[in-house]
Amino acid sequence: MSDGALTALHVFRFHVDFHADPARAENRTPMCSGAFAECTGLEATMEAKVIKEGGRNDTAIQRCGPVTFATVVLKRGMTETRDLYRWFELVTGGKYSYRLSATINMYDAAGVAKVAWRLDRALPIKFKAADLNAKGTEVGIEELHLAHEGLRLTPPSRPSLA
């Protein structure tokens, strides 16, 4: 438990870094990174296993079951940078399924990283470019959907937004 006062983090201050293997020293520099407008799907669900014990009719025993992870969806305004699409293209083009780890750093109001979520062995499963409309004036939003093999809290990979 923490002794200090708890400060709620604003959900609009976050940054995503993609690494080949963040455990290796030579891969600590992100392969690509981005400021995204939206990140959804940071969730893990454990399926409880119910065991009905003979002679025990008032209750069932609950045991830990397999854990599944939701698809993480990242959205951002379209830019000229094509790194994330190239990654998707590499995977879907019949090449080796190139997996990256993604770290999502959350910042406080002063721009200091407080919490980070890490996606292990992320794989791009969907890329959606912005809808084009000659009558519209909004910013185009692109999406990247990631399947992954693990979600964990880690120390932030970027100490500050600077």
Image: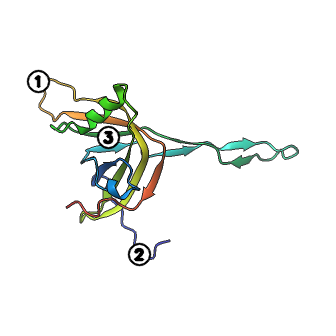
- Residue 63 drawn at (x, y percent): 69, 48
Q: Quadrant of residue 113?
A: bottom left
Which residue bears the numbered disc 2?
4
Position of 2 compared to 128: left or right?
A: right
Position of 31 compared to 2: left or right?
A: left
Of the residues under marks 1 and 3, which one precedes in the sequence? 3
Residue found at x 41% / y 56%: 23
Per the model, the C-alpha gap separating discs 1 and 3 is 26 Å
Residue found at x 77% / y 47%: 59
Per the image, label 1 sits on a secondary structure element best described as: loop
Name the amino acid type tagged 2: Gly
Per the model, the C-alpha gap separating discs 3 and 2 is 32 Å
Q: Nearer the viewer, mark 3 or mark 2?
A: 3
Name the amino acid type tagged 3: Leu
Residue found at x 46% / y 53%: 152
Which residue bears the numbered disc 1?
135
Residue found at x 26% / y 33%: 86
Position of 64 compared to 106: left or right?
A: right
- Residue 126 drawn at (x, y percent): 35, 30
138, above or below 156, in the image: above
- Residue 107 drawn at (x, y percent): 29, 60
- Residue 71 drawn at (x, y percent): 43, 37
Which residue bears the numbered disc 3?
74
Per the model, the C-alpha gap separating discs 2 and 1 is 52 Å
Mark number displayed over residue 8: none
